[in-house]
Image: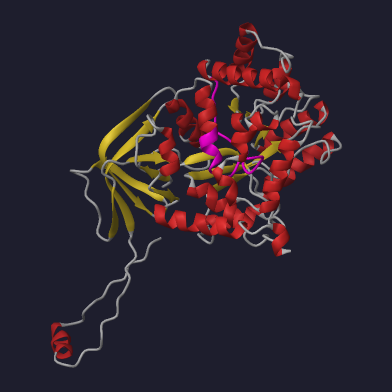
């Protein structure tokens, strides 16, 4: 909470006496605002298929909440608020990274003490104010508390525990116990990786349903898409298992097959987190020269960059058969468009940090890829704001500019419905009630780039 500093004068007589005495030089006292008022701003509202702008609004923030939204001409502002001129600017709810990662506390090489904080800041610097962390490490629960308590700058975290996979689970009984352990430890959801047997997966799913814990991620080969949907997997990430379900990893999927996948998804009320840009890189369908030229690469440690560049040089590049990379990519783009058009919930994610997927910066590449698939900008922004808030509706209110919502948003210089690239050039970000103007963000990003400009070999 913001603090007030008030000065009380006990009596007029004391004031008179003191005025007659020689006075020491006055000390400047910094008064912290008790809240924020964004005046004259255009508020962006979103539905799954459309977007709108409500002009000339004032948005009030106190603590970590939006406390009022109303017409600038009539909405009164409490005293001691910091006033921010929003005329000719747009307010968009903060983005959610629904398949993100928080790196291990040990960091990378000679950067163990700073890499974690840099990743958290890069999310926020790009307007990503919520992250669903999809691979748990022990330190993350404390990290989540640190952010909530204001000890670190970072997005609000919802965390999956250590993953369920072929190496971590050896029996249905072990899967059952792992669910119970992660529930008791305080993790928000369960992460599914490849390698589980059908019996292990079913044991995990049954226990998770009884424990009221969501689970999401990959679809193990022995399970298959339909069994995962029947079991209640909340999200299918990377569109995993979809093309395998119709055996279309090396040929073009038919319209009939795409319609079947849409109907199957709707039947079991699943949401998809597509991560299209990252997956194009993984399967070898992305433009290598464009990847090498990403300007945001300067914000990651040298040894990470070296690993990424090395991946591009591998002759066997590709998560699948590289000979079929473009067919797979075309299928993925047609599939996500079919799922969107068919009404299957889509929630935004980029799988950062990952190959050429730099936290926060990766959002613009994903937006571009989804637009290339034919999905309207409003639908993409809805998937990154409102849809993420709906997913976590039982935990908090966020994802829209409205009273009672968590104060997560960006101040933009242009209308993002017309020019989504305006997100990358925002004028400032508010994360859980903390305001970071553009100058503050740019200064910290410059400091991060400078820290990673020195090569690993030089410092070692």
132 or 101, nearer to the observer: 101
Considering every residue shown, the one lying at the far bottom of the view is 21
Q: Is residue 389 magenta?
A: no
Q: Residue at x 62, y 12 (%)?
A: 258
Whole-percent x, y for residue 215 in the image: 67, 34
Whole-percent x, y for residue 401 in the image: 37, 39
Give the quarter of the figure containing the C terminus. bottom right
Left or right: 138, with 49 as reference point: right
Q: What is the quadrant of residue 59 in the picture? A: top left
Q: Residue at x 76, y 26 (%)?
A: 320
Residue 116 seen by the camera: yes
Give the quarter of the figure containing the N terminus. bottom left
Magenta-drawn stretch, dominant element (helix, strand or loop): loop
Residue 184 seen by the camera: no
Q: Does 398 appear above or below 243?
A: below
277 or 406, nearer to the observer: 277
Q: What is the quadrant of residue 318 in the picture? A: top right
Considering every residue shown, the one lying at the far top of the view is 256
Whole-percent x, y for residue 100 in the image: 61, 41
Left or right: 390, with 310 as reference point: left
Q: What is the quadrant of residue 135 in the picture? A: top right
321 or 92, nearer to the observer: 321
Left or right: 164, with 13 as reference point: right
Left or right: 397, with 71 as reference point: right
Q: Does 364 appear above or below 338?
A: below
Q: Is residue 354 magenta?
A: yes
Q: Does 27 appear above or below 362?
A: below
Range of residues picked out in magenta: 344-365
Whole-percent x, y for residue 164 in the image: 76, 38
């Amino acid at each position: 909470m913001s603090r007030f500093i008030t000065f009380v004068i006990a009596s007029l007589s004391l004031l008179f006496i003191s005025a007659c005495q020689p006075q020491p030089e006055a000390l400047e006292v910094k008064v912290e605002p008790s809240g924020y008022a964004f005046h004259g701003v255009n508020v962006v509202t979103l539905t799954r298929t459309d977007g709108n702008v409500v002009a000339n609004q004032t948005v009030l923030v106190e603590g970590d909440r939006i406390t009022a939204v109303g017409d600038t001409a009539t909405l009164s502002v409490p005293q001691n608020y910091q006033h921010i001129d929003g005329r000719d600017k747009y307010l968009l709810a903060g983005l959610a990274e629904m398949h993100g990662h928080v790196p291990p506390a040990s960091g990378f090489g000679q950067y163990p003490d700073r890499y974690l904080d840099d990743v958290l800041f890069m999310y926020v610097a790009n307007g990503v104010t919520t992250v669903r962390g999809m691979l748990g490490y022990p330190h993350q629960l404390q990290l989540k508390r640190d952010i909530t308590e204001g000890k670190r700058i970072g997005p609000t975290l919802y965390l999956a525990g250590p993953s369920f996979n072929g190496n971590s689970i050896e029996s249905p009984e072990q899967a059952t116990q792992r669910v119970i352990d992660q529930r008791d430890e305080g993790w928000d959801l369960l992460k599914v990786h490849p390698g589980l047997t059908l019996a292990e997966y079913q044991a995990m799913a049954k226990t998770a349903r009884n424990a009221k814990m969501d689970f999401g991620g990959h679809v193990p080969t022995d399970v298959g898409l339909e069994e995962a949907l029947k079991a209640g997997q909340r999200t299918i990430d990377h569109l995993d298992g979809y093309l395998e379900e119709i055996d279309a990893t090396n040929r073009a999927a038919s319209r009939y097959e795409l319609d079947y996948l849409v109907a199957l998804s709707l039947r079991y009320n699943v949401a998809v987190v597509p991560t299209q840009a990252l997956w194009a890189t993984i399967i070898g369908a992305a433009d290598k020269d464009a990847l090498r030229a990403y300007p945001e690469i300067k914000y990651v440690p040298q040894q990470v960059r070296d690993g990424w560049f090395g991946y591009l040089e591998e002759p066997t590049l590709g998560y699948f058969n590289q000979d079929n990379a473009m067919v797979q990519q075309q299928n993925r783009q047609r599939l996500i468009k079919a799922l969107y058009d068919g009404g299957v919930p889509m929630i935004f994610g980029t799988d950062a940090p990952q190959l050429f997927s730099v936290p926060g910066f990766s959002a613009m590449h994903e937006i571009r890829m989804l637009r290339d698939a034919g999905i309207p900008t409003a639908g993409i922004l809805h998937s990154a704001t409102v849809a993420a808030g709906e997913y976590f509706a039982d935990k908090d209110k966020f994802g829209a500019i409205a009273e009672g919502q968590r104060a997560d948003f960006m101040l933009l210089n242009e209308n993002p419905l017309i020019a989504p690239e305006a997100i990358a050039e925002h004028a400032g970000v508010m994360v859980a009630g903390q305001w970071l103007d553009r100058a503050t963000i740019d200064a910290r990003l410059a400091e991060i780039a400078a820290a990673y400009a020195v090569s690993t070999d030089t410092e070692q």
